[in-house]
Image (cartoon, grey):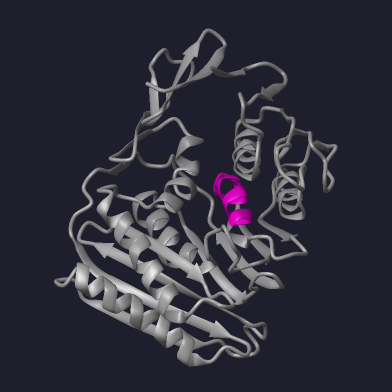
Amino acid sequence: MLAVTRQTMLRKFMMNVFPGGQVLRNSAAYSALLQRPICIRKIRAGRDRGGLRPQHLTGLELIHAIFGGKLENAFVTSTSIVLQPDVPKFAKEYFFEADAQTAGSVALLLQTCLPCLTFLPSKSLVVLKGGTDAIKAPLIDYSILVLQPLLRKFLRMQVDFRTIKRGFYPRGGGVVEVRVEPQREALPALDLVDRGQVTRILCRGVVSGRLALDVAQRMAKTASVHLSKRLPEVPVEIEAFREQKEVSAADGGFLLLVAETSTGCLFGASLLAEKGVTAETIGKDAARELFDELSSGACVDQVKSQLAFKPVLCCWTTVRSDCFDCVLLPCSDSGCRISSSSTWRWRGDTLACWQGR
């Protein structure tokens, strides 16, 4: 059983699991929004290079810059931190900047700060620097083409993501502007139970630096062919382009696939171009990944299920989807089935999670 007690200090304990980047991002955002201090220990203790990495530290420092308060023991390789958020000072317009100084994912920095920016009293502009297209992280184009429309349509969030400069792994150096209007009203209940029929698929291939435009075209074309075989009734569009030097001078490339349904649901799948891996292999593998997402029967893909629901879970609201059902009530005895394998309930002063139904 995992338990979080509502005391002066919230302590995050994991059973048989060392807190990684996802725990850090979620815990920091929830701590700031709920105005509850939090301590996280044994950070990435099971990894070869344990403790905080630059991208994790940058995310924590960004939360600290937004809310103030105290951030203790925060440095690269640190295995424990304490975050004591304060109430953010009022400003007519907020401006923040966060630089991972590596190819650390900008999309994951966005995941950390977006819920916090949403509930600030005034509009905000954040400049995020790092890897726009990094390994084991969502592409920034995924955030723009898949996540952003969902936030606008279903949650009525006024957000705008704009890529100023691309930063491919391992060089980084990307720049993204994030503009967020304040949320004047409570977020609406999120109801995603009708996926509808797939009506359109976009295959976008992008390259820069010394990679030829032909690579982007072959990645997108191969994915298009494989998807058309499995979904012959769905029109497939192809986009392939080479970034200008002003936007990206580094060598890199990626393939992003986006499927849209009749009810407005969006699904994404992506792969980075890799040395020694043919464009055809990337196209085929990405097409398989998207088809698997569509075959799941869910209304969101795996990446979006982590990114999109965090603002909702910070509120007392209702979430209904074929991924999970969730009712968040303050100090309620009601259970919240957040996923098929976790159940949360208030027991006195403790919010506890039982693994398994």
Residue 260 rendering spot, x and y as whole percentages: 28, 64
Residue 144 rendering spot, x and y as whole percentages: 47, 66
Residue 333 visible in the shown view: yes
Query: How many numbered marks are there?
Result: 0
Q: Quadrant of residue 274?
A: bottom right
Magenta segment: does it hold 116?
Answer: yes
Residue 137 rendering spot, x and y as whole percentages: 56, 58
Compare residues 95 and 303 and report the one nearer the observer: 303
Residue 123 visible in the shown view: no
Residue 190 rendering spot, x and y as whole percentages: 34, 42
Compare residues 158 and 339 and report the one nearer the observer: 339
Q: Is residue 123 left or right of residue 66?
A: left
Task: Please give the name of the residue rendered at 74% of the width and 32% of the height, measured from the top-left corner.
Answer: 42
Q: Is residue 61 left or right of residue 27?
A: right
184 in relation to 142, above or below: above
Magenta segment: does it hold 138?
Answer: no
Task: Please give the name of the residue rendered at 38% of the width and 16% of the height, measured from the top-left corner.
Answer: 334
156 in relation to 40, above or below: below
Task: Please give the name of the residue rendered at 56% of the width and 78% of the height, measured from the top-left corner.
Answer: 276
Dividing the image into 4 quarters, which one contains the C terminus?
Answer: top left
Q: Quadrant of residue 131?
A: bottom right
Task: Please give the name of the residue rendered at 40% of the width and 67% of the height, measured from the top-left corner.
Answer: 285
Q: Is residue 330 left or right of residue 124?
A: left
140 in relation to 51, above or below: below
Q: Which residues are magenta?
A: 108-121
Q: Residue furthest top?
A: 348
Compare residues 253 and 101 and report the one nearer the observer: 253
Q: Main secondary structure of the magenta part?
A: helix
Dividing the image into 4 quarters, which one contains the N terminus?
Answer: top right
Q: Is residue 257 left or right of residue 97?
A: left
